């Protein structure tokens, strides 16, 4: 079959710029980017659409229905007699998951399915670097292709609403503009490989606690302004080929078969791909059939054959669907639309003649993983230039904490990985600090990993703590490597965290270490904000996320100063939990009462809440330190007055005023004082990362369409762009604004 690729010159130019930028900014040749195939397929050609219609005519009703639901945990049936292939899917957002058994969640036991584990998406978002996101997506797509996957179940773009959400680490933070900007190049990168990205979980899946049953009540403004934009960007700008529904309900109806699909996703945004259910999120045949779900996955498959009630044929979109089609209760056009979409996905993936070959575990992928890690790490505190640490003879470094050795690719839920290797923090530190003496002790133990269960620790915690104090006494420097992990009730799917503070006695341990050694730097490994009553006892703090295969190397790159940190927080760290907008309103808002929760924080999520309510965060959205210093000067805009169709052009000079090369992120926020509706003080509307040598300066230009200042007006069910004055805020963090400029929209 002949497939026509539509050349996308914007993508080509983007990739060329990314490639050149990479050489200029980092002085390294990126072989991978240069080898990329500069074409993507956004809409299908008429030729292909005609072929889809031909195939449709040849399919029996039974064959059509069989294509709309799972045949195993991660695949759907093909049509053998017509050469239509099966579809194979795999998690997930930061690496291709190991093979799972046909009917249950156990590891299939393959020995050729280990891969590169890339950093989790909080880290990618913290890089504020869309070019890097493109490289990430492309490398991940190559691995998925190598593993013969047609659909990669990621990325996740649910908005960070509460720091307790167990899955925040899989997502791209609290800001819809940041998540939208970072997700688009990721998706394009994955799909260049002829592998469909599946953006998830649509929508309002912002907590794991009671995730199958919780009913979310949120306003249209919160929906359109906060929770949907990243999905919209995935569809409209990246041309994503599949979307995954979510477990939760919205306004009383399950989101996997909700009007959010037909009305918003498929009609307003003209999504022409496949809506896939989350695994076991389908609940009703009529709703699934009529409300826009195309493919049902994961509905109670455990024990296939042993328990007939769970058999794939008994899925809501299997025999019950067929029966209703045969009786005429559901018109055949309904299944035809689903199959058309599924065939379209196939022509983009496993029926595409031009699909490139994949690659896995190659040096380029490891380099991407390492670079995303180093660019996403956020330096939060650095008194007396604690970091970088110079590797020298005679220096004794005590590395204390379970996370120095614990695997962070195991656990966490569906995003768990089986990497070919995983460099732990201690391995990375030892490899980099060859002259210094490295001492190591656990300090605390959290218990082995077990999905949906907390296993108790097996070692004596007091002995571990005392041993840590003894080790700390002998050292010049203590590096405390702690935080959360991928266990149940930590950063893990299926439930939320139970406490905002550090678990497993780490707060006491830090206090006790401080009694014997005052020179402490904390390497915080987490996908979430934590409470820090111990902060004034430590000299330095670096948030290093979950970094995958190259974790230890990325951490060592930053703490040694080989790489100057440039990550910025993609979400706010509140000082205490009640300072967060979702928690401020009590249980009705989070985690819900009687299985319903009201998003009373509404549009004021994250820094929008802190800014507007004047609640000082511990660390603000967009904040992150460097080993050098930057100044922003000559901050100007091109005009004072704009029309609705204009763009606001902001220019500014960034100067590296310190002694080391490094990168800074210029951030532009815009707010509307005197609005007719409630508005956040300011919202991120543009950003740009620039790399500068010591003493160098550069002019940064950021272009913001005036149309992006609109709010969602519930009285007209549409976007409304108010005229009048707006304030443009330019700075390098949401709480560090160098200049405010008032503009007028006429
Ligand atoms: C998760 C999805 C995942 C799916 C398949 C579900 O429990 O919510 O994100 O893709 O399982 O593993």
Image (cartoon, rainbow, N blue to C red):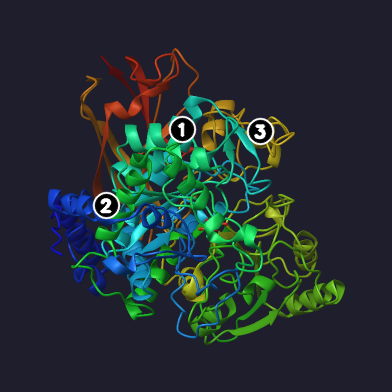
Closer-to-camera residue (541/606): 606
Does label 2 point to a residue whose CB lies under 8 Å from ligand 1? no
Q: Classify 48 as above or below 258.
A: below
Q: Quadrant of the C terminus?
A: top left
Q: Quadrant of the N terminus?
A: bottom left
Residue pointed to by mark 2? 56
CA separation in Å, label 2 and label 3: 43 Å
Residue 399: numbered disc: none
> Along the polypeptide, which appears first: circle 1 or circle 3?
1
Which of discs 2 and 1 lies nearer the camera? The answer is 2
Return the x and y of residue 405 as percentages of the image width and height: 63, 77
Residue 169 as seen in the image, left or right of residue 269: right
Residue 455 as seen in the image, left or right of residue 622: right
Closer-to-camera residue (158/625): 158
Q: Quadrant of ligand 1?
A: bottom right
Which of discs 2 and 3 lies nearer the camera? The answer is 2
Residue 597: numbered disc: 3
CA separation in Å, label 2 and label 1: 26 Å
Image quadrant where residue 36 sits: bottom left
Closer-to-camera residue (643/560): 643
- The structure residue drawn at horizontal position 55% and vertical position 62%, both measured from the top left corner, is 414
Judged from the image, the secondary structure of the residue bearing numbered disc 1 is helix
Residue pointed to by mark 1? 259
Q: Is residue 556 visible?
A: no
Return the x and y of residue 241 as percentages of the image width and height: 32, 52
Dot 2: few (<14), some (14–19), or many (≥20) neighbours within 10 Å? Answer: some
Q: Classify 252 as above or below 666.
A: above
């Amino acid at each position: 079959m002949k497939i026509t690729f539509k050349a996308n010159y914007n993508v080509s130019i983007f990739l060329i710029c990314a490639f050149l930028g990479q050489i200029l900014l980092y002085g390294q040749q990126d072989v991978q980017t240069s080898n990329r195939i500069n074409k993507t397929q956004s809409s299908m050609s008429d030729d292909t659409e005609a072929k889809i219609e031909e195939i449709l005519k040849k399919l029996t009703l039974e064959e059509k229905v069989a294509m709309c639901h799972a045949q195993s945990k991660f695949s759907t049936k093909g049509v053998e007699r017509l050469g239509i292939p099966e579809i194979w899917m795999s998690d997930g957002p930061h690496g291709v998951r190991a093979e799972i058994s046909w009917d249950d969640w156990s590891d299939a036991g393959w020995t050729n399915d280990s891969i590169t584990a890339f950093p989790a998406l909080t880290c990618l978002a913290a890089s504020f670097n869309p070019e890097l996101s493109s490289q990430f997506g492309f490398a991940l797509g190559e691995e998925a292709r190598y593993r013969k996957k047609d659909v990669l179940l990621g990325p996740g773009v649910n908005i960070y609403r509460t720091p307790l959400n167990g899955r925040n680490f899989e997502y791209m933070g609290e800001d819809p503009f940041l998540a939208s900007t970072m997700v688009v190049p990721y998706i394009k990168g994955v799909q260049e490989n002829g592998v469909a990205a599946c953006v998830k979980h649509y929508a309002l899946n912002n907590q794991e606690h009671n995730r199958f049953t919780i009913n979310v009540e949120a306003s249209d403004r919160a929906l359109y302004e906060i929770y949907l934009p990243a999905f919209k960007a995935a569809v409209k700008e990246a041309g994503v080929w599949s979307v995954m529904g979510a477990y939760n309900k919205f306004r009383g109806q399950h989101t996997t078969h909700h009007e959010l699909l037909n009305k918003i996703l498929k009609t307003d945004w003209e999504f022409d791909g496949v809506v896939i259910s989350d695994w076991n999120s389908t609940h009703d045949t009529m709703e699934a059939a009529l409300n826009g779900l195309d493919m049902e996955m994961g509905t109670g498959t455990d024990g296939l054959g042993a328990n007939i009630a769970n058999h794939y044929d008994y899925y809501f979109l299997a025999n019950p669907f067929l029966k209703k089609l045969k009786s005429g209760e559901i018109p055949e056009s309904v299944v035809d639309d689903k199959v058309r979409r599924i065939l379209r996905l196939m022509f983009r993936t496993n029926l595409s003649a031009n699909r490139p070959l994949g690659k896995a575990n190659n040096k380029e992928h490891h380099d991407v993983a390492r670079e995303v890690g180093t660019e996403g790490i956020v330096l939060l505190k650095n008194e007396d230039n604690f970091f970088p640490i110079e590797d020298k003879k005679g220096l004794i470094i005590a590395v204390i904490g379970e996370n120095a050795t614990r695997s962070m690719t195991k656990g966490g839920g569906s995003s768990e990985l089986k990497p070919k290797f995983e460099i732990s923090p201690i391995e990375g530190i030892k490899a980099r600090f060859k002259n210094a003496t490295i001492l190591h002790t656990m300090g605390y133990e959290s218990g082995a990993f077990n999905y949906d269960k907390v296993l108790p620790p097996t070692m004596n915690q007091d002995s571990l703590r005392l041993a840590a104090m003894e080790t700390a006494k002998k050292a010049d420097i203590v590096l405390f490597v702690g935080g959360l992990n991928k266990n149940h009730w930590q950063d893990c799917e299926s439930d939320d965290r139970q406490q905002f503070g550090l678990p497993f006695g780490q707060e006491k341990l830090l206090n006790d270490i401080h009694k014997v050694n005052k020179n402490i730097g904390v390497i915080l490994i987490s996908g979430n904000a934590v409470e820090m009553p111990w902060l004034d006892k430590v000299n330095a703090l670096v948030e290093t996320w979950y970094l995958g295969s190259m974790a230890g190397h990325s951490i060592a790159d930053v703490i040694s100063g080989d790489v100057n940190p440039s990550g910025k927080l993609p979400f706010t760290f509140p000082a205490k939990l009640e300072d967060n907008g979702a928690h401020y309103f009590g249980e009705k808002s989070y985690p819900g009462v009687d299985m319903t929760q009201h998003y009373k924080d509404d549009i004021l999520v994250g820094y929008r809440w802190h800014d507007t309510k004047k609640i000082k965060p511990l660390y603000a959205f967009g904040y992150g330190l460097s080993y050098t210093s930057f100044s922003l000067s000559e901050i100007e805009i091109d005009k004072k007055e704009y029309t609705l169709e204009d763009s606001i052009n902001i220019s500014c000079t960034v100067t590296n005023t310190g002694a080391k090369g490094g990168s800074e992120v210029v951030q532009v926020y815009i707010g509307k004082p005197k609005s007719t509706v409630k508005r956040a003080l300011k919202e991120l509307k543009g950003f740009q990362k620039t790399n500068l040598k010591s003493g160098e300066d550069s002019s940064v230009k950021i272009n913001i369409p005036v149309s992006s200042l609109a709010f969602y007006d519930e009285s007209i069910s549409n976007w409304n762009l108010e005229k009048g004055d707006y304030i443009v805020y330019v700075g390098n963090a949401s709480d560090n604004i160098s200049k405010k400029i008032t503009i007028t929209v006429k």
